[in-house]
Image (cartoon, rainbow, N blue to C red):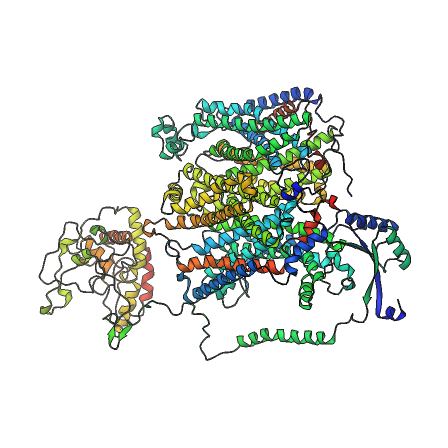
Amino acid sequence: MHQTRPAKITSPIFSLKDGYVRTIPLALIVGAVGIGASLFFSLGDGLSDGSLRRFYYIYLVNFCFLLSIVVGCLFFVTIAHLTRAGWSVTVRRIAEFYAACITPLFILFLPILIPVLMNSDVVYPWVHGGWSLHDKTEAAAIAGLPLAERPPIEVMKAAYLNPIFFGIRIVAYFLIWSAMAWFYLKTSLKQDVTGDKKLTLRMHAFSAPGMILFAAVLVFSSFDIEMTLSPLWFSTMFPVYFFAGAALSAWCTITLTASWLQQTGRVTDEITTNHYHDLGKMMFGYGIFWGYIAFSQFLLIWYANIPEETFWYNQRINHDGWRGFSILLVAGHLFIPFFAIMGRTARRNRKFLSAAAVFILCMHWVDHYWLIMPEYDSVNKTFTFNPLVDLPCTVGMIAVFIAFFCLVARDRPLVPLRDPRLGQSLNHVVH
Amino acid sequence: MATVNNYLDNTYDDPDHRAPLVLGGMTYKTVTETVVAPWESDKPPRIWYLLFATAVCLLMMLGACIMHLLLKGVGVWGNSNPTYWAFPIVNFVFWVGIGHAGTLISAILFLFRQNWRTSINRAAEAMTIFAVICAGMFPGIHIGRVWAFYWLFPVPTEHLAMWPNFRSPLLWDVFAVGTYATVSLLFWYMGMVPDIATFRDRSKTKTKKLIYGLLSLGWTGSARNWHRYEIAYTILAALATPLVLSVHTIVSFDFAVSQVPGWHTTIFPPYFVAGAIFSGFAMVVTLLVPARAIYGLQNLITLRHLENMNKIIMATGMMVGTAYAIEFFIAWYSGVPWEGFAFYNRAFGNYWWAYWIMVSCNVIIPQLFWFKWCRTTPWFMVIVCIFVNIGMWFERFVITVTSLCRDFLPSSWAYFYPTSIDIMMLVGSFGLFMTLFLLFCRFLPIIAMSEVKGVIPLEEH
Amino acid sequence: MSHNQNQTSKLVGLLAEFDDPDSLVHACDHARQYGYKAMDAYSPFPVHGIDPAIGIQRTKLPFIVLSVALCAVCLGLGMQWYTNKYDASPIFPGYAFKISGKPYFSLPANIPVTFEVIVLSSAFATFFGMWLLNQLPRLANPLHRMERFKRATNDKFFLMIETGDAKFDRSRTESQLQQWGAVAIEECRQDLTDIKLPSWLKLGGVLLAVLLLLPPVMIYRAMGMTNRHPRLHFMPDMDWQHKFKAQRMSPALAEGSYLFADLRSARAPVAGSVAWGHLDTDGEMYRGIKKDWTPKVTATATVGPSVSTSTSSQDAAAAPPQEPTEKVAPPAVVEEDLTKYVTEFPEGVNVNAELLARGQQRFEIYCSVCHGYAGNGDGLVNARAVALNATGQATWTTAKSLHDPIVKDAEKNPLGRIFETISVGRNTMGPYKDQIPVADRWAIVAYVKSLQETGIKPLLVVDPAAADAPAVEAAPTNSSD
């Protein structure tokens, strides 16, 4: 009854071809200029006393933003194999490329990790003592004392929050993620050549334990990288919150990349309207999921009203500038995308969906900004938005990330060429 | 296409083509006849009578317990200072959780286009409704003065001159469970209308013709009707998906918005939802394995269906296990002594036995499903699933009782003992559930014929 | 087909049967291309690809649901706002009350219920909207009269071209359908003889409607009636409980024998019980008695109920011993042991401006009504009572002036004694320990001492004869401090 397309790639180019040779140097130059400018202006930031703290914080915001995209793409690949998904085959390679960017991303984390290992609390306050005290003069006095003089809660938490263990954990996270990502990419690329369906079975078999590893690493990495910025605060929901944002941004990034590849004529009719429809559904669904998680976390802390937890939300909601950001998040991260991509027509329109993806990604950046930046001025919790530092750094880091993607993708095929489920994906129809 | 190999086993994993979801070379006609057979036969199998008699006995015991409770008051339960929430709440959360699998199968798997849901969704949805009835009963009788139940709803009454408190999570529960029961019922009935029309067209007696004729609303299967029907079904699925999340989320709010150590933890909403799906799937497997054997539905509810469900059981079991681990880690990491004590007390305190029953049933035993034999052998998976249900009941028991029995005030510390009424009501609620389910098996289509016909491989025709 | 049949039944359309969904879709395609519009396909399950083949427009159902959902947002929030915040309505007003420290209308706490209302309303809109758009339930349909059509819900596929179509032509349409692959073609006829409702059904419906109206009418009537009979007790409702209610008689075990000999069901606390949080071991602070003071053991000292109702043993010990009972002396002449009272403020009471200000405020609340703002014993109550005394309408002991030399004397009235006076009363003055917390009593003591030191004289001496004037004098004393 249905017209069945043969399981063959018909696009004329289906790789970045020579594009990456031009893109990588350009992106790196933009990255260097952006990060350089941000470093320069950071010295002049009012609150950082001539240090680079401002730069470090905005750098961490962007790092977390990029990390969540990469981790989300790794999740996409794993879940696609776990559920034996057929429809997503033609967009899976894009996710595989992004997931493999986890390895170069580790290099981007070094500027954060090295100061921690050198016992500097420029980013993570727990490196030195005194962070749990409200009286900052006392904190300053204690900071110079040996570990035993710290308040008991700091001594207790130092078992987990200490530079060496932190470093070991971070390296372990990136090793596990990289191993997973490269396993998928290598196996999938090998299948392009051999067409062996056993490779698919091998990826299927790996996906179940892979998912457990992924979950374990995600839980602790989100605690370590973002939650410990405010070492007194804790929320068991935090990893789920991080995951919801990560998965959402991954769907957006994949949509955007697919759209760009089609726009530039690299992949033509392998990615159909039906794929965009499904990607749009996923963006819609995960947007609601993010809202659900964010609201649940907020409601539980707001309702119980326990000081150990509420201070974190208090500074984000009851300080004027951050209140604006909170409202922006609720509106922009949840409600605007909800109404924008609710309809079938909107989801089946590639350009509209791409615009929505860009918007959601911006909001996802705001989300990480909102998570991290209030800790920058942890004393007064004032609202600090310094466009001269923040924006160049963001542009620069995204440029570097694009360079990473081009480096990983190089002249490799942008769609799996001989996946056994290619036919299913090409003939995928959303009713 | 149906080779001998396929007939016996469709659990293989071949990326080249999808394994068939219906076996035995079935056609539209044979699907209809297989599903209708138990209903058309004059007498149900003997085992049905046996089960039904047992279930009705348990149901009568439940009725007697409820009468006793109404006449004597809630003091007949073991609930006492400081454990004022005990069996009734535990049973409520347990049954609501069971219900979640039905909606998950009919709504979420539908949205994810998991076609294998078609064979099992009807029974699972029916199970949802019966489980929600069992669940709703417990808070219903827990309010003590049952005849004043309407105080729970915003009813304008002159003599009461007041309204419910909408800031209380217990009232959210009323709305959540009420909405859930209603929407599940609509969803179930709407999905059943085309199949009831099949029953109508095969009815022989006048009574049956009248009843099924009215219930089928004059359905003809017109293409215009199907068009709106399918869109309505998708919308209901899209509504039921956040609804099912919200229901167990709100149930978790009952605990988590409080300041009780061990209850107030932010991961509760997704963790409760995962646990609910976990227990619900286990219940579906427990019910469907005997049902497919009794009614000869092996070609429609195939091993692949069961295997897929077992995989979901394993996955959600591990989510629940992860949540246990995160809770313990954060209880330590938070540095809050009360949290730390609550969790230490759970594992090594006076209810250590309940905690370790929970961990072994929920986290350790489902790991058997890593082995293909375990997840494709019907009798064995039923055993595992019964353990899962025991474990999930104990999870709610552990959460509720261990946190309460160690009050903030050590002078109030006490050990909770259930009374015989407590236990008889728990057992009796299974009687209610089984009675309803057996009646459903007898009088309504237990498999969504119209949906199964849609996924029969085209080559067979 | 005879002429007679044509009168009793009407042709509705031609029904063509097909064996599989593909041939049905092909036939629909042909029919649409030919130009048929009034047609419909019937299948046991939704056949994909039939919508364009038959020319079905996408339904507006999603928009109906969306608009209902948006209304439900207002409904859900409005309901909670009205019931929990707005209580100014004259009929069925809301009920605003503070609970768990949340505002009356607190958006986070109101979101769950709003969400459920949205889902419930949208689900109703979807469910009922779908049946409405499908024009179901429709129980009388000529199709259901056809034996062949029964397989439309089983395994066969049908296409019906209706007579209402402009291009319908009995014989041409039949041959077309055959050409398009129909395996069987049958006429669908509507029986005209039984399209009317039977008359008994109408009558029954009216009767049922009338009967249904009866219960609400009876309830409404009962609401306006009184009844001398006791309320029907269909549930015990905790009316008979296994407990003794306050201030009832002790239950009788048998004739003349009671569970409690004193015939009271209420029990006094066990001797020596101390109320939670009232151990009060610091005697100087709580009673104004020196730490190292021990009562002189005088023969048969008993504690009269007028001395102190406190059950604390120390309090009992501190009470002034009474004369032996055989002497029958009035309690007023009991010789007091003045050495037991503290003469300094106890530890923990810091006498400073703050304490004095507090003392003044409390004094003016509790003491000034009798003793007057300046302590001259000319308070409003006192003045009124003295005036009533004069006419014989009251027997009032005049309140003491705090500037009275005996009251002022530090020997006869040490600090502890003043404190005791405030706490348990003296002569006709009542005890204030239940009204005034300990710290405030000490603040009053401090203020009384300071009043006495300043020695303010009354601005207006009360003349007992001028009974009409008491209200005037209170005002100027305000300015005395």
Q: Outermost residue, front direction?
A: B4
From what the image shows, is residue A232 above or below residue C212?
above
Residue A138 position in % (x across, y down): 37, 31
Q: Quadrant of the N terminus of chain B?
A: top right
Q: Is residue C238 left or right of residue B14?
A: left
Number of callouts in the render?
0
From what the image shows, is residue A230 above or below residue B356?
above
Residue B165 position in % (x across, y down): 50, 57
Nearer the observer, B151 or C305:
B151
Q: Residue at x 58, y 74 (%)?
A: C215
Q: Is residue B189 visible?
A: yes
From what the image shows, is residue B118 above or below residue A426?
below
Residue C338 position in % (x across, y down): 14, 56
Q: Residue A274 sits in which quadrant?
A: top right
Q: Is residue A336 visible?
A: no
Nearer the observer, B76 or A421:
A421
Residue B456 position in % (x across, y down): 70, 47
From what the image shows, is residue B14 above or below residue C266?
above
Q: Residue at x 14, y 52 (%)?
A: C293
Q: Outermost residue, bottom direction?
A: C228
Q: Residue at x 75, y 65 (%)?
A: C140
